[in-house]
């Protein structure tokens, strides 16, 4: 059996994106997964530790294995869990992980953030660059954990020049993944806000996987936006999916969603309405240049991928 | 038995209900389409007659990069632009009867048009844009920067984006110029457009941002002077306190609005003059005082052009 190039510790391995990343990496590299959830049809050469990131057991993994790289996908964002749970899991877990990375001589840290950390705002520039302030938490508190993680990773990036830290900020990921954006686009009738039709960017999940692999294997270091193919108005995404829309005036949509949310009839938190109201688009020139990343899936393929995860 | 009168419903084939709403809609659809097609033909005809070529032909000569989504990087959709230009061209030709001089001064490639802002409603921007699309060769499609708060308005925000307007932040301006687009900036901003009639044709303070942008991106500046817009709505005062309360930049007092029909702008004659391109170099991060000097030269050029235009015109409406 060929020798594996690197040993990679992957958190959040059992999520849909984590499984895709595992299948992509395990042929060339030794992959160790840390996730409390079970992995469906785990490849034989992948080790899976069903353990909480905050537990001491994780430290033992670092002691017994020479970990070369860490890929952190283990970010909990179940909108129904309490924010205290979120915070402790996300921030405490990641802080521990950063500590091990510095202590055990890890050479690479890849953290998956999101373009949502910038937040949709009426005065956003059309294309946000990596140095734009992370204002997503101003209206949407559930994103604050991710912003804090992003800031922690940024601090780590500057504090530890011996370690290449990469922060990836992809736009809405579509495919088999389940996130707010793809769940929204999979609704049988898609509600929109009357008179608002912001440009949106979508990225195919396999293009994100590809970016993660590039970041792990290459020498890159820094923060990278991932934008996917060309942007288009939200209404056209929905039209291309062949779904009917239901335009609702904002004045009516907001209280309705508030009501539905408090009655637990929807999984969309009310502040997310801003995503179908204002732009939150990113400039990916840095990723195209430094990581030599071009999206492999064109606009048509990316949009159609929304249907993969339909149940 | 044959003489028994049959009611209308009985004459229908059995099992078929009365015409449903859907049937009515289906019957109407072809007629609606016909009407829309006829309107589209009228629009095409009018635009062809004013431009000497079809809208599509002219649009093809504009340096525009449409993505697979059918819009450009800022959301401009040629279909929407067509209707926008149609409406603007009707005003341009028949309502304000625009008279344009010096349009040959518009260079190819990146350019920053700097003009005086007036008339309470930004029709001046639309008319300058129309002039550059209809009369310049090659046609230019100018982008202008809109106030951030317009993005919170339904329909308005979508319309602005589809016809090529961008949110007024420096990043957007830089990006447009770096991709060799034409950008229109009114450095007077809201204070200029909402000025009262006693200060007509007197330029208010110019911001420094446009100069920094021009130096940074090495963009020529073309001064533009619009004469005729000040008189379209005569404002006698400004309820700035109330405006601030509602969250809009200005709330002008316009007596004509209270006269029936006065809601329309007065049909003044627009005279649009384009000056020779001005080039500036230096350090974009220079002291404000250094930049102010450069801005001053642009401002005085436009003020001079305004004086000339005012001296030349014989009447406000003709």
Image: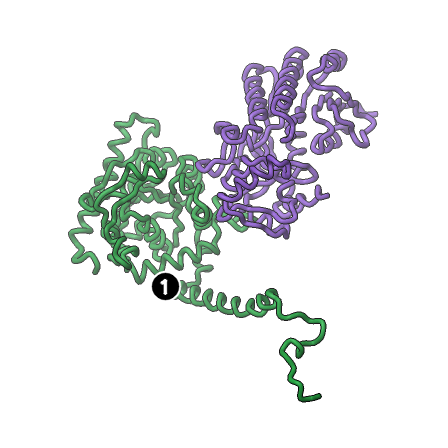
Chain colours: A purple, B green
* Residue B223 in which image quadrant: top left
Classify mark 1: helix, strand or loop: helix
Residue A68 in sight here: yes
A256 left or right of B215? right
Q: Residue at x 61, y 21 (%)?
A: A84
A48 left or right of A202? right
A73 left or right of A233? right
Residue B99 in sight here: no
In percent of width and height, residue A49 lies at 77, 21
Q: Residue at x 58, y 70 (%)?
A: B27
Crowd tier of the residue under label 1, counting other residues whose Cα lies within 10 Å: few below 14, some 14–19, many 20 or above: some
B317 left or right of A48? left
In percent of width and height, residue A137 lies at 52, 28
- In the rendered picture of this protein, how many numbered marks are placed on residues? 1
In percent of width and height, residue B8 lies at 62, 78
- Residue B29 position (above or below residue B227): below
A289, A136: nearer the viewer: A136
In percent of width and height, residue B152 lies at 44, 41
* Residue B259 in which image quadrant: bottom left
Q: Residue at x 84, y 25 (%)?
A: A1
Chain containing the residue with disc 1: B
B140, A199: nearer the viewer: A199
Residue bearing mark 1: B50
Looking at the figure, which quarter contains the C terminus of chain A? top right
């Amino acid at each position: 059996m060929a020798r594996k190039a690197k040993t990679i510790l992957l958190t959040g391995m059992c999520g849909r994106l984590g499984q895709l990343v595992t299948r992509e990496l395990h042929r060339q590299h030794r992959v160790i997964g840390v996730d409390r959830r079970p992995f469906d049809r785990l490849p034989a050469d992948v080790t899976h530790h069903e353990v909480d990131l905050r537990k001491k057991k994780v430290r033992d993994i670092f002691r017994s294995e020479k970990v070369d790289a860490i890929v952190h996908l283990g970010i909990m964002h179940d909108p129904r869990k309490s924010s205290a749970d979120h915070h402790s899991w996300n921030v405490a877990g990641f802080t521990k992980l950063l500590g091990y990375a510095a202590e055990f001589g890890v050479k690479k840290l890849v953290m998956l953030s999101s373009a949502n950390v910038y937040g949709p705002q009426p005065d956003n520039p059309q294309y946000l660059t990596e140095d734009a302030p992370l204002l997503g938490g101003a209206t949407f508190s559930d994103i604050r954990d991710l912003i804090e993680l992003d800031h922690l990773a940024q601090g780590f990036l500057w504090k530890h020049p011996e370690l290449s830290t990469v922060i990836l900020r992809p736009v809405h990921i579509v495919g088999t993944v389940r996130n707010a954006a793809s769940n929204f686009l999979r609704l049988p009738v898609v509600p929109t806000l009357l008179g608002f039709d912001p440009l949106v960017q979508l990225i195919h999940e396999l293009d994100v996987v590809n970016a993660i692999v590039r970041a792990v294997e290459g020498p890159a270091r820094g923060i990278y936006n991932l934008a996917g193919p060309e942007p288009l108005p939200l209404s056209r995404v929905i039209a291309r999916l062949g779904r009917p829309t239901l335009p609702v005036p904002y004045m009516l949509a907001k209280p309705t969603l508030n009501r539905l949310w408090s009655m637990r009839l929807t999984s969309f938190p009310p502040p997310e309405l801003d995503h179908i109201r204002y732009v939150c688009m990113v400039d990916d020139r840095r990723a195209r240049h430094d990581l030599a990343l071009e999206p492999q899936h064109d606009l048509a393929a990316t949009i159609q991928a929304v249907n993969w995860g339909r149940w | 038995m044959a003489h028994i009168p049959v009611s209308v419903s009985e004459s229908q084939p059995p099992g078929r209900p009365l015409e449903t709403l859907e049937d009515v809609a289906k019957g109407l659809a072809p007629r609606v389409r016909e009407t829309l097609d006829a309107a589209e033909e009228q629009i095409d005809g009018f635009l062809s007659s004013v431009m000497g070529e079809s809208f599509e032909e002219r649009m093809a000569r504009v340096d525009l990069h449409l993505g697979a989504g059918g819009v450009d990087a800022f959301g401009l959709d040629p279909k929407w632009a067509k209707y926008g230009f149609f409406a603007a061209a009707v005003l341009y030709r028949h309502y304000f009867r625009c008279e344009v001089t010096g349009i040959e001064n518009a260079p190819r490639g990146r350019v920053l048009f700097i003009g005086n802002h007036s008339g309470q409603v930004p029709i001046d921007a639309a008319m300058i844009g129309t002039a550059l699309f209809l009369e310049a060769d090659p046609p230019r499609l100018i982008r202008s920067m809109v106030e951030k708060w317009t993005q919170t308005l339904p329909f308005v925000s979508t319309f602005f984006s589809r016809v090529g307007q961008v949110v007024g932040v420096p990043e957007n301006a830089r990006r447009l110029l770096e991709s060799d687009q034409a950008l229109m900036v009114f450095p007077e901003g809201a204070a200029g457009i909402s000025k009262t009639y006693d200060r007509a044709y007197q330029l208010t303070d110019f911001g420094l941002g446009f100069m920094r942008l021009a130096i940074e991106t090495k963009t020529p500046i073309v001064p533009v002077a619009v004469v005729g817009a000040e008189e379209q709505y005569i404002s006698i005062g400004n309820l700035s306190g109330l405006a601030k309360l509602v969250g809009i930049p200005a709330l002008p007092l316009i007596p004509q609005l209270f006269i029936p029909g006065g809601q329309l702008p007065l049909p003044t004659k627009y005279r649009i003059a384009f000056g020779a391109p001005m080039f500036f170099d230096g350090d974009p991060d220079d002291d404000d005082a250094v930049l102010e000097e450069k801005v001053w030269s642009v401002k005085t050029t436009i003020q001079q052009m305004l004086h000339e235009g005012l001296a030349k015109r014989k009447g406000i409406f003709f």
